[in-house]
Amino acid sequence: MDTNILVIGSGISGLTYAIKIAQQNPSLEVVMISKNTLLESNTRYAQGGIAVVSNFKEDSFDKHIKDTMIAGAGECDQDVVKFVVKEGHDRLQELIDWGTHFDKQKNGLHLTKEGGHSEKRIVHHKDKTGLEIQESLIKKIKTFSNISLLQNHTLVDLITDHHSGGNYKRCYGAYVISNLEQEIIKISAQITVLSTGGAGQLFSHTTNPENATGDGLGAAYRAKVFIKGLPFVQFHPTALYPKIKRNTFLISEAVRGEGGILRSLSGKRFMTEYHPKAELAPRDIVARSIAEVVNETGDDYVLLDCKAISEKEFQNQFPTIKENCQKVGINPPHDHIPVIPAAHYFCGGISVNHYGETKLKGLYAIGECSYTGLHGANRLASNSLLESLVFSHRAAINSIDQMKETLPPRDFYLKLPEWKEEHYFSNEKISAIGRIKKQLQNLMTTKVGIFKTSIGLIEAEVELKNIFLETQDIYLQNKLTLGICELRNMVSVAYLMIKQSQDLKQNKGVFYNQDYVE
Ligand SMILES: Cc1cc2nc3c(=O)[nH]c(=O)nc-3n(C[C@H](O)[C@H](O)[C@H](O)COP(=O)(O)OP(=O)(O)OC[C@H]3O[C@@H](n4cnc5c(N)ncnc54)[C@H](O)[C@@H]3O)c2cc1C
């Protein structure tokens, strides 16, 4: 398969980028691949909304910039923060023009306030903003005849000069596996875009879906692209404790905002002992406090007591949370909700410039898989959807400009080598994948999770080496499958996270090494 532009991932970033390209230049062919259905993504699960300055009477760009910089704990790139905040308004309007609905009030959009924001500036669609965005973008993208959509297709590796015996200078597309037939397809492209989202699945508890395994990061790393900021993983303090499935569901901060109280299983309110703002302390502090209580008591979770919220209020404000709790037999606000901190957002990712370009020519990275400098050491709530919108736009405009430059001729792309499966000779060890994945998740949770220590990070590196060797063995001895691809990427991202965490000598933002506490 050969195309002008290959987009890998169909969350808010990939969809927005592809729509922009198709609108601006209908003569360009775009192929978009997605690991599962077009819908399944982190975007789909976003509840809170998008942080955009729109009430200029009380709010201002300066206030939003300041809030973002404070949250980022000195690690933000100020120029990036400035243009993202300022361009947000136009990007939001485009989303509305394309058919996304946000809640309204008398004088315009209904705005909420989230932790770390000095003003009300979160635009939202009830408590399911992400689903509304995702569904409207999917509807929009299907109207373009120059975009081909390939669901259930997974990136294996980026194609670079390396595959033809050269160095890593330019990206020429990707090798992709069809999940069902398990066939490897070569998709050559003049421009390749990674929009593969986060990697919450590295940890035992995560708000991210099963497909968030850091594939874009793993593939970029193998193509020698620089990955930055991985120690900065945001853990959401209150995710539903998963009784049945491992995947959990986010219990929004707004529930605590409306009066939800955190209690240990013995019924004791504990947040008052950790922070003057108790349950409304910054996310990282609430997450650490819950983790400490769980460690001390040996319980698996703590309880969120929602009795201060009336039945009617809860139903009105949190219909999706109520529905998801009821699915597992919990009926808030009558029943306490069992909660546990869960890996939520990767502030780090593939290092890019102001236009989403990586150092590898022809390769862009946008959205959660990228590191733009906006979030620094801690993301301000609801800034990630904003970042995705702004960088997708910038990357699309820049890509169209790139296409005007002298690129290798089209027949060069057609002659790129096919995927070589030289090493496959048995399928015996494939059943070990599930066990190794669990071992990796346990390791990352206990040694590289909310609490880290310098010794723990060294132990993690040693144990990861064994996991790597076992994974490599499976990769070399088996026909490639989706499971092998994901595990290989998770191991790479874990390795980078451990090494980068060892190099950090100071606690900042969401990074917390107990040895550095004075
Ligand atoms: C529960 C939850 C609540 C959130 N709430 C908010 C919020 O209120 N506000 C906010 O700003 N942010 C929120 N976030 C974060 C935000 O949703 C994400 O950062 C954002 O949606 C990322 O968009 P994306 O397009 O970069 O990636 P995603 O939406 O994750 O999309 C990634 C896409 O890549 C595909 N993919 C992955 N690997 C491969 C592969 N190997 N091959 C092919 N395709 C692949 C996936 O299938 C998917 O289509 C929340 C996140 C979660 C999980």
Image (cartoon, rainbow, N blue to C red):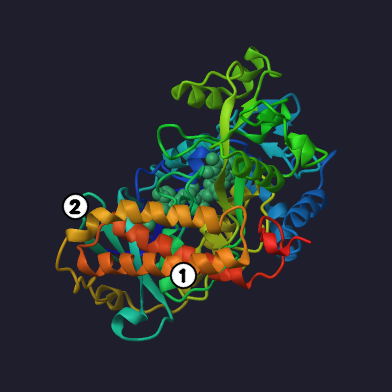
Residue at image coords 74%, 36%? 271
Residue at image coords 27%, 58%? 177
Q: In this view, does 447 lie to the left or right of 86?
A: left
First of labels 2, 1 by sequence position: 2
Looking at this rendering, what residue extends furthest in the left direction?
Answer: 425
Above or below — where is 89 with respect to 163? above
**Residue 309 shows which numbered tag?**
none
Residue at image coords 36%, 59%? 487
The answer to whether residue 169 is visible is yes
The picture places residue 36, in percent across and down from the top left corner, at: 34, 46
Nearer the camera: disc 2 or disc 1 = 1
Q: Is residue 515 left or right of residue 398?
A: right
**Residue 462 shows which numbered tag?**
1
Label 1, ligand 1: CB separation under 8 Å? no
What residue would you read off at disc 2? Answer: 181
* Residue nearest the observer in this picture, 264 or 183: 264
Quarter of the figure that contains the C terminus: bottom right
Above or below — where is 209 with respect to 157? above
Query: In 3D space, how far apart are the residues under numbered discs 2 and 1 (Cα atoms)?
Result: 36 Å
The answer to whether residue 95 is visible is no
The picture places residue 400, in percent across and down from the top left corner, at: 49, 65
Looking at this rendering, what residue extends furthest in the bottom direction?
Answer: 166
The picture places residue 359, in percent across and down from the top left corner, at: 52, 76
* Residue nearest the observer in this picture, 32 or 242: 242
The picture places residue 319, in percent across and down from the top left corner, at: 56, 22
